[in-house]
Amino acid sequence: MLRFIKDLGHYCILMAQVFKPSERFSIYYHLTIHEIVTIGIGSLVIVLTTSVFVGAVTTVQTAYQLVSSLIPRSTIGAVVSASALLELAPTITALVLAGKVGSNIASQLGTMRVTEQIDALEVMGVNSASYLILPKILGGLVAIPALVIISAFLIHVGGIIAGDLTGEVTHTEFAIGVREYFESFQVTFMMIKAITFSLVITTISSFYGYTVVGGAFEVGKASTKAVVTSCIVVLLMDYVLAQFLL
């Protein structure tokens, strides 16, 4: 418990330093664009693959549960769509990105720490916390919600493909179910989750990487801790947001 309180205090202090940028706006702009490309384009393939198969599996399992002939087949599209927007797209994407993006951020900053590159920035009078971490946070706030939107679309695509291939629901019936039961707040809730999870992944991973002490072995441990902690906090925030917003 004491270790948790200590880490939380160090985390809050670091975030206070991060949001005090000392360099020109143009520098942060170019660094942020680089992070958007790194996070967004670099994670596109794994998000695409995961989302299509999640949509396909959800459709097949929903069709398996709806065994009654009294329930219209379009209900499958409604269930898959609501599940995609409320839970699958933001949460599954965040957990996948916690492993890929989170470990990359932690290992990158950790390597800079143990090779004394961060110390060199501090000697030159640069606010290293802001210079290194703020672009990653801003880049994540743009790239991760965009990936969540793409994921939601691809889950629907995967559901339609699986429905047509298995014969459980046609693409027309699927689309009818999506339109009939769609609520705009589902999209709003998805984006709130996406932004929250983006902050969780980027800030926690940056914290563990930036505060590494030791050598290469500690960088690996910090990367693992960043992924595990990010996943736990994502799931915790998933419950908190559902409890208070739904």
Image: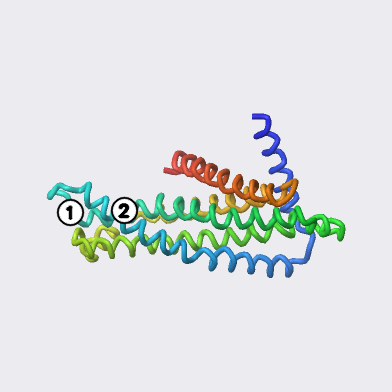
Label 2: few (<14), some or many (≥20) within 10 Å? many
Foreground of the two, 223 or 50: 223
Foreground of the two, 18 or 178: 18
Which residue is under mark 2? 58
Q: Which residue shows up at 54% across the image and 53% down it? A: 99
Report x, y in % for residue 217.
Answer: 68, 48
Q: Does the rendering let one see residue 189?
A: no
Gap in Å between the C-alphas at discs 1 and 2? 17 Å
The three-letter code of the residue at mark 2 reads Thr
The three-letter code of the residue at mark 1 reads Pro
Q: Which image quarter holds the C terminus?
A: top left
Report x, y in % for residue 29.
Answer: 68, 68
Which residue is under mark 1? 72
Label 1: few (<14), some or many (≥20) within 10 Å? few
The mark closer to the camera, 1 or 2, is: 2
Q: Which residue shows up at 64% across the image and 46% down it? A: 221
Q: Does the rendering let one see residue 97?
A: yes
Residue 119 found in image quarter: bottom right
Taking the view exactly as shown, the residue that stands out farthest to the top is: 1
Report x, y in % for residue 176.
Answer: 24, 61
